[in-house]
Image (cartoon, rainbow, N blue to C red):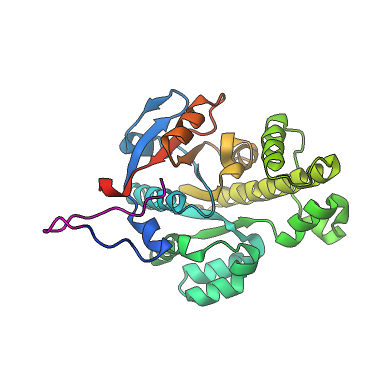
C-alpha cells in the first residue's frame, strides 16, 4: 500500500528513481491488482468492467482526497473510457458551481494553471494538493473535455454546519435544491462517519446540522449532475469525481441524481489493500458496483 509508482525495467534491470511529485504518482500507477464486481463477489477483468461502465450514463469514481492511488484510478479510467468513446464530460466536487465560468475558460485554453487556481479560489475553497489533480485537469484541457463544477458554495455549507438552515439568508435559501433528509440508510452512514470524527461530540443538534450540510452537498451536486446530462448538447457519458462518502452505496449523489433523471449509473470505489477490499466485499448491500484494488508499483 502507498508504494510509489510503476517501475520500468531498463537494459541494466535497474529501476528508475521514484517520481518526484504526487502528479507523477497519479500518472504512472499500474493497472489494478484485482477488480471485484461487488454484487456477485467475482473478480472481473478491466475490459469486462469497462464494458459495463459504458452502459452507465454517469460513472462515479470515489476518492479519499489526499490519496494519490485514488486519483490514479480516476485518471486511468477516464482515459480508457475516452479511448472507447470520446464523448464524455468530467464533473468535479473540487470546484464550486459559481466558478463554472472559470472552468470553461480553462477548458477553452484561456487560463494557465496559476490563474485557474487563483480565480477558482482552489487553495481556500478546496485546499488539497493541486498536484494530485493536475494530470486530470491537464488531460481534460488538452482534449477540450468539459469540466463541470458540482459543489455548493462553502458560504452555504459552512453556515448550515454551524448554524443550521435557519442561519442562511433568504437569497442563500433560494439557491438550495430540494433536500431529502429522510433517507435512513444515508443518515446512518453519515452519522457513523461523523461519530468517528467527533464532529459535535454527543450534541444531537450539532450532529443534525452537520448531517444537513452533508445533504446540501449531495443534493447540490446531484442537481448539477442531472442538469448536465439533460442538456441537449450533453456528451454521452459523465464521469464524476467526488469523495467516497458522496457516492458510497449510491446514497449520496448517485440516487439523488437518478431521482432527477441521471440514470443509469455505476459506482467505483478504490481499495488500498486486501483488508479494505475484503471489507467492501462483506458489506450488504454492496457499497459500489466495483472495487478496484490498487496494484503494486513494481508490477508493471
The answer to if 11 sits in the magenta stretch is yes
Query: Would residue 287 appear left or right of 77 to someone viewing this image?
Result: right
Q: Residue at x 84, y 57 (%)?
A: 168
Q: Is residue 32 above or below residue 76?
A: above
Residue 116 placement (x, y as % from top left): 54, 72
Query: Would residue 86 appear left or right of 107 to someone viewing this image?
Result: left
Give the quadrant of residue 202. top right
Residue 142 placement (x, y as % from top left): 39, 66
User: Which image quarter holds the N terminus?
Assistant: top left
Give the quadrant of residue 292. top left
Part of the protein shown in magenta: 1-14
Q: Is residue 153 above or below residue 37?
A: below
Q: What is the number of callouts on the image?
A: 0
Main SS of residues in magenta: loop
The one of 15 and 289 positioned closer to us in this rendering: 15
Q: Residue at x 68, y 39 (%)?
A: 190
Q: Residue at x 59, y 40 (%)?
A: 254
Residue 199 placement (x, y as % from top left): 74, 47
Residue 278 placement (x, y as % from top left): 46, 29
Q: In the rendered image, is residue 262 in sight?
A: no
The one of 215 and 192 positioned closer to us in this rendering: 192
Amino acid at each position: 500500500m502507498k508504494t510509489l509508482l510503476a517501475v520500468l525495467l531498463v537494459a541494466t534491470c535497474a529501476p528508475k528513481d521514484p517520481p518526484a511529485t504526487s502528479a507523477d504518482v497519479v500518472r504512472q500507477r499500474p493497472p489494478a491488482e484485482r477488480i471485484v464486481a461487488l454484487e456477485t463477489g467475482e473478480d472481473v477483468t478491466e475490459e469486462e468492467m469497462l464494458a459495463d461502465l459504458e452502459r452507465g450514463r454517469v460513472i462515479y469514481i470515489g476518492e479519499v482526497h489526499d490519496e494519490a492511488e485514488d486519483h490514479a484510478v480516476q485518471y486511468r479510467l477516464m482515459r480508457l473510457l475516452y479511448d472507447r468513446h470520446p464523448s464524455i464530460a468530467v464533473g468535479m466536487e473540487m470546484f464550486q458551481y459559481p466558478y463554472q465560468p472559470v472552468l470553461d475558460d480553462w477548458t477553452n485554453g484561456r487560463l494557465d494553471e496559476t490563474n485557474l487556481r487563483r480565480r477558482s479560489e482552489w487553495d481556500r475553497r478546496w485546499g488539497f494538493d493541486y498536484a494530485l489533480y493536475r494530470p486530470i485537469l491537464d488531460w481534460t484541457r488538452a482534449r477540450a473535455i468539459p469540466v463541470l463544477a458540482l459543489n455548493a458554495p462553502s458560504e452555504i455549507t459552512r453556515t448550515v454546519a454551524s448554524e443550521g438552515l435557519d442561519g442562511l439568508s433568504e437569497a442563500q435559501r433560494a439557491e438550495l435544491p430540494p433536500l431529502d433528509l429522510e433517507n435512513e440508510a444515508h443518515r446512518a452512514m453519515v452519522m457513523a462517519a461523523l461519530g468517528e470524527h467527533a464532529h459535535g461530540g454527543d450534541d444531537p443538534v450539532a450532529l443534525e446540522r452537520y448531517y444537513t450540510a452533508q445533504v446540501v452537498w449531495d443534493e447540490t451536486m446531484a442537481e448539477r449532475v442531472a442538469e448536465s446530462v439533460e442538456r441537449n448538447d450533453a456528451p454521452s457519458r459523465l464521469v464524476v469525481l467526488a469523495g467516497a462518502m458522496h457516492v458510497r452505496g449510491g446514497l449520496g449523489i448517485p440516487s439523488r441524481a437518478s431521482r432527477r433523471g441521471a440514470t443509469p449509473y455505476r459506482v467505483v470505489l478504490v481499495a488500498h489493500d486486501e483488508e479494505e477490499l475484503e471489507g467492501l466485499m462483506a458489506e450488504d448491500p454492496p457499497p459500489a458496483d466495483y472495487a478496484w484494488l490498487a496494484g503494486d508499483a513494481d508490477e508493471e
